[in-house]
Image (cartoon, rainbow, N blue to C red):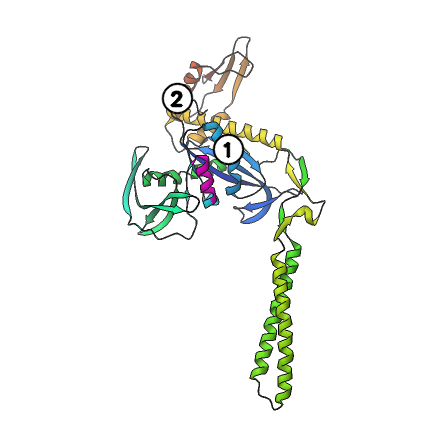
Amino acid sequence: MLEADDSAPEVFFVDDHFVAYTGSAPLAKGWNTRRRRGEPGRNDTLIVDENWRAICFSSGAPSSLSKTMWGPLEQLRVICGDRPVMVGFDRGGAYPKVFAELNKAGFDWVTYRRAPLEVPSVLPKHSWVTIDGYRHYIQVASETLHLEDVGALRQISIYEDGQVALQILTSDLVSSAARLAHTLRSRWRIENSFKYLQDHHGIGWLCDYRMDRRPNVAKVTNPMRTQAHNALKSAELAVAELERSIGRNATTQTVDIKEKNNTLDSLSRQLEVARVAFEEARVALKAIPAKIPATDIDPNATRAWPVTNRRALQMVCRLLAYNAELDLARTLNNYLCDLNEYRSITRNLLHQPGEIRYSPRAITVTIRQPDAPRINRALSLLIEQLNANPPRLSGDNRPITYQIEPKS
């Protein structure tokens, strides 16, 4: 698909898509951003190019983008070879460790800066970029930063109403700031791709209910640390209470000085013992790991996961169908010229009634004529283009030709 392009794409976007699971199998939990809560499910990590096409993917247990992006990026490097490409992603991967690994792997990258934003050290200036024949103006301040273990990178501050609205970090030190801002704004293409795939290609469906059961080696809260933390808290409260008691007794007026001194001596000894116990509890807490594998707590703990090969085959078929529909829609729009509705018009045409005839020498597809004249004209021109180089079914040499059924 990429080799058929006139020019190879230079920008790719990577992101996670969480798919919730509502069954009874013990799947790993992830953060559902739509419902704002943790739920069982899985993560699909997808890479799309600047033309919205799906390139490669991976499926796995829910995790952060900084961990899940590496599998698809390794596939992308194999697909693109050694040629330079840029990867765009959101704040889920905006960490210095990720930047260093991307530099090491030979990727250019662009992302948002995580909060808090820094005050730019240079004054903003107006910049412009031409996109699809239209000139876009933007007020930006561009400066070079140095991060430990990362090296030189570029920070672009974008202004709105005289204030910094967001900041962009990128490894590209030479391109136009306005162009890079537009590139990162185009990251919404992968969000829209996820939404389209969810609505029309069922990437969130669970089509196979069989699950693999594996030992649950995921890290969970260590109950021993919880107990040790509670013990430390109790020891701390005991020290604080004794210190308050000593303060009250030392400042309280009394006639019997001897009894007061004996009470203070007793409280001081108790305080010394309590401080020793507090220090021992603190040392004990430090030695206990915060999280341990679930199998260390329960040797029989298991985790479910959809059968991998079936899930992968389903995703491949769905992404191929998505790419084919996208390519068909864009080809149709060359004749339709409707940027707002060409995707929905193509989906409707895929459901257009018709007839398929098989003969020993050819396969003929007859499509019922659309009611709208402009759609009928665009479809006729598309059919002429398809029939100029007829497609064929896999393993079948008969050409497939298309025609529109005339209205009776």
Labelled disc at residue 74: 1
| Residue 269 among those drawn in magenta | no
Real-space Cα separation, disc 1 to disc 2, in angstroms: 44 Å
Q: Residue at x 39, y 21 (%)?
A: 377
Name the main secondary structure of what is drawn in magenta. helix
Q: Is residue 314 above or below residue 228?
A: above
* Residue projecting furthest to the top: 360
Q: Is residue 304 above or below residue 377?
A: below
Tell me where the magenta segment starts and ends, as one range: 97-107
Labelled disc at residue 105: none
Q: Is residue 370 left or right of residue 296?
A: left
Q: Position of residue 88 (x, y in %)?
A: 43, 38
- Which residue is at the front of the view, 141 or 26? 141
Three-letter amino acid code at the position of disc 2: Arg
* Count of numbered circles on the image: 2
Q: Are marks 1 and 2 in contact (CB under 8 Å)?
A: no
Residue marked by disc 2 = 377
Q: Residue at x 61, y 65 (%)?
A: 279
Q: Is residue 203 visible?
A: no
Q: Position of residue 66 (x, y in %)?
A: 50, 42
Three-letter amino acid code at the position of disc 1: Glu
Q: Position of residue 109 (x, y in %)?
A: 42, 38
Q: Position of residue 216 (x, y in %)?
A: 66, 43
Q: Residue at x 53, y 41 (%)?
A: 67
Q: Is residue 375 above or below residue 14?
A: above
